[in-house]
Amino acid sequence: MKQPSTGKISRRHFITKTAAAIALPTILPGSIFGQNRPSNRITVGVIGWGMQGPDNTRNFLAEADCRVVAACDLDKNHLKDAVDTINENYQNKDCAAYHDYRELLARKDIDAVMIAVPDHWHALAYTEAARQKKDIYGEKPLAKTIGEQQAIVRAVQQNKIIFQTGSWRRSQASYRRACEIVRNGLIGKVTRVEVGLLDGHIDFLSQFSGSNASFEVQKPPVELDYETWIGPSKMQSYIQARIHKNWRWNYNTGGGMLMDWIGHFCDIAHWGMDADRSGPSEIEGRGEFPPKEDVFNTCTKFRIELKYPHDVQMIIAGGYPEIENESTKWIGTEGWVFAGESGIECSNPKFTGNKNLPDELRKVKLYESPGHVRNFLDGVKSRQPTVAPVETAHHSATPGHLSLISMLTGRKIKWDVLKEEIIGDVDASKLLTREYRAPWKLS
Ligand SMILES: NC(=O)c1ccc[n+]([C@@H]2O[C@H](COP(=O)([O-])OP(=O)(O)OC[C@H]3O[C@@H](n4cnc5c(N)ncnc54)[C@H](O)[C@@H]3O)[C@@H](O)[C@H]2O)c1
């Protein structure tokens, strides 16, 4: 789950590198930033301090040209840890603490926000941040439903903000090189793509604290504003095993392993396929689901077949050993490439390894990111798109949402890629959105 640290890049190095690429003025225009800041630094607020928020924030703290000035969480213990960590880093007491993210977002002196809240909160938090003209480092999957994702894309585009999604493998050279092998035709015409995700559930609370999470109904702990934590989702009794980190195993708040990982390995699959603005036209899958009333009720094992343009077949699987977990494999008429946590493998061993393709073979060059947070901060300054912008995040997660809809309805889904509509299936179409619990509304 960890994003590798981007490492510290000096301001001098940053300006030299970026200026060459985008002719950035050495004096940064004041209009890019808000008022009343101590220096020309980008001011950042962080929202959500659970599993991923601290990792993301550490990468911001490592960058000299930004300053984290505010933190927000609904859990008082998490919020205190956030404020203490940020203050300790800067050796001061300046970090402001917020319970309500809307108050943090209303601050005019904050330029950008890192948001790492559970998926059921993404749409409300991202659209409000966009409305307040904050650049966003957000998380995958883009949102809990396709309808919410469309609202986020609209809000980001209308407000002309910079968006980076936490699909950080796009900032890793090995995945880029694998995608360049595919894009440069070195495995021939792609016919099949295998996306390997994880299966089952992990009780993160026991993994992190060593003691089992409680699966009993209890009173919410005093430190957590549980009513707000549930937010726009259906109110459920408080069960510790359904909250921090484990929310992803219950469909009221998360999307199981399928949606937790789609924003990594389908995202990489699309990059290689040149499908960042495209998608599948037919989706058919089967999965194994626990009873709906279980605390962990998300799909434990799944295999989905998707039809892409140009006769490309994609398989998305979790729990099928023939498709390796946490990997993407492209198979073409003249060979294959595999990219996973262990690195790249290729049917032609000449292309396996740590070097870029030789120039004569590397006609298509993909976006070279210096690090995911670094790339976001560069985008905030240059106003150029990041390596994982909102439109890409939307298209990377959409096959996962449609796969889930196919499994839940038990039917093949036909998808109009351009109109972004399910064709001829009223009941399946209802699953493109979800009802919000009052008073929450997505505008
Ligand atoms: N890019 C990656 O590799 C990666 C890895 C892990 C998680 N994630 C993503 O990060 C996001 C957060 O996941 P996590 O595992 O850190 O969850 P988590 O439950 O560990 O942490 C979420 C935090 O957000 C807080 N929170 C919830 N609603 C809030 C609200 N409305 N306002 C303010 N704070 C709120 C919670 O109290 C909690 O502290 C998810 O979208 C997840 O998919 C990405």
Image (cartoon, rainbow, N blue to C red):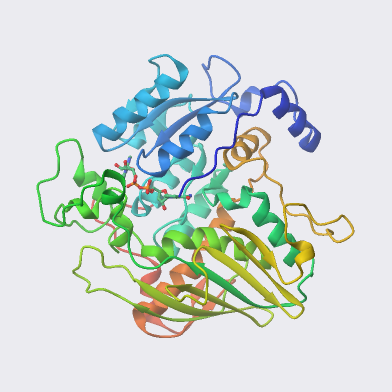
- 355 left or right, relative to 122: right
- The spot of residue 313 in percent (x, y) is 60, 80
Tell me which corner region of the image, top left, top right, bottom left or bottom right, holds residue 200.
Answer: bottom left
Which of the 4 image quarters holds residue 144?
bottom left
Q: Where is residue 351 in the image (x, y as percent from the top left)?
A: 77, 62
The reply to whether residue 28 is in sight is no
The residue at the point 20 percent across, 52 percent down is 212
Q: Residue furthest right?
A: 360
Residue at the extreme front of the image, as rendered: 349
Residue 362 visible, this orientation: yes
Q: From what the image shows, is residue 246 above or below residue 81?
A: below
Q: In this view, does 331 lie to the left or right of 6?
A: right
Q: How many labels does the image show?
A: 0
- Up-down: is 375 above or below 83? below
At which x and y percent is residue 201? Answer: 32, 63
Q: Who's the residue at 78% across and 76% down the image? A: 188
Residue 335 x %, y %: 73, 76
Vertical side of 93 occupied by 25: above or below: below
* Camera-side residue of 180 and 273: 180
